[in-house]
Image (cartoon, grey):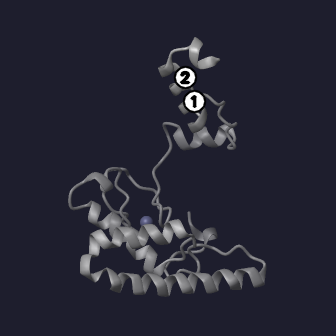
Amino acid sequence: MEWTERPLGEIIIHELKRMVGWGKPLPPDPWPEELSKAVYGPDARYVCHHCFTPQDGCGWFCPECGAATGPYNNWTAYIYIFSTGEIYRAGTSARIRLSPFVTGTYIFMSIFDYGIFAPVYWFRLHRNLKRCQQLDLLDEDDGTDGDATAESGEDVPPPASRQ
Ligand SMILES: [Zn+2]
């Protein structure tokens, strides 16, 4: 009997670690080592997550597209509003991944941010989700996997001209 030979706390911690998966060996890094050096190296540069324009690292917004790109935008009072605005705007106009988690998160968070106006946001979210669903069906018919930004209606250059 294990529980008579070991302290109860040790058994509980062992079982919790087993349930959560602590102590398991990490899976191998799927990326080549050169890529990790390029991303984390001292000469690596920040780029805009929206248009891939190189950033100097001290601004709050991308000078090309206006996206919130500052390193602490999400933590800065007043500036975080622009970050959350980008997220909500993506829910109503960009091509987003269709999943119950994403939809539920948009609905749940919009209750707190929009209050009594949340149903207006839900209507626009629902309209965008239907549009994304139709685009996914079109991609399945074409046999392509689609481009998340090319069909979003946003002014994003094709990947070949992003330099
Ligand atoms: Zn940008």
Which residue is more in the foreground, 107 or 96? 107
Mark 2 touches mark 1? (CB < 8 Å): yes
For the question of whether residue 65 can be seen, the reply is no
Q: Position of residue 107 (x, y in %)?
A: 40, 73
Q: Is residue 100 in view?
A: yes
State the CA–CA distance, disc 2 to disc 1: 6 Å
SS label for mark 1: helix
Count of residue discs: 2
Q: Secondary structure at mark 2?
A: helix
- Residue at 28 percent of width and 52 percent of height: 75
Q: Residue at x 51, y 15 (%)?
A: 7
Q: Amino acid at mark 2?
A: Ile
Q: Position of residue 131 (x, y in %)?
A: 56, 86
Residue where numbered disc 1 is placed = 15
Q: Find residue 67 and report its image quarter.
A: bottom left
On the rendered structure, is 6 left or right of 9?
right
What is the three-letter code of the residue carrying label 1? Glu
Mark 1 crowdedness (10 Å alpha carbons): few <14, some 14-19, many ≥20: few
Res 96 → quadrant: bottom right
Q: Which residue is labeled 2 in the image?
A: 11
Q: Is residue 78 left or right of residue 27?
A: left
Q: Residue 69 or 3: which is nearer the viewer?
A: 3
Q: Identify which residue is drawn at 56% across, 25% down.
A: 14
> Residue 159 or 49: which is nearer the viewer?
49
Viewer-closest of 90 and 60: 90
For the point 57% across and 70% down, which residue is it?
A: 99
Q: Is residue 3 above or below residue 91?
A: above
Q: Quadrant of the C terminus?
A: bottom right
Query: How far across and how far down the image is residue 69, in percent?
Result: 38, 58
Q: Quadrant of ligand 1?
A: bottom left
Q: What quarter of the picture does the N terminus occupy? A: top right
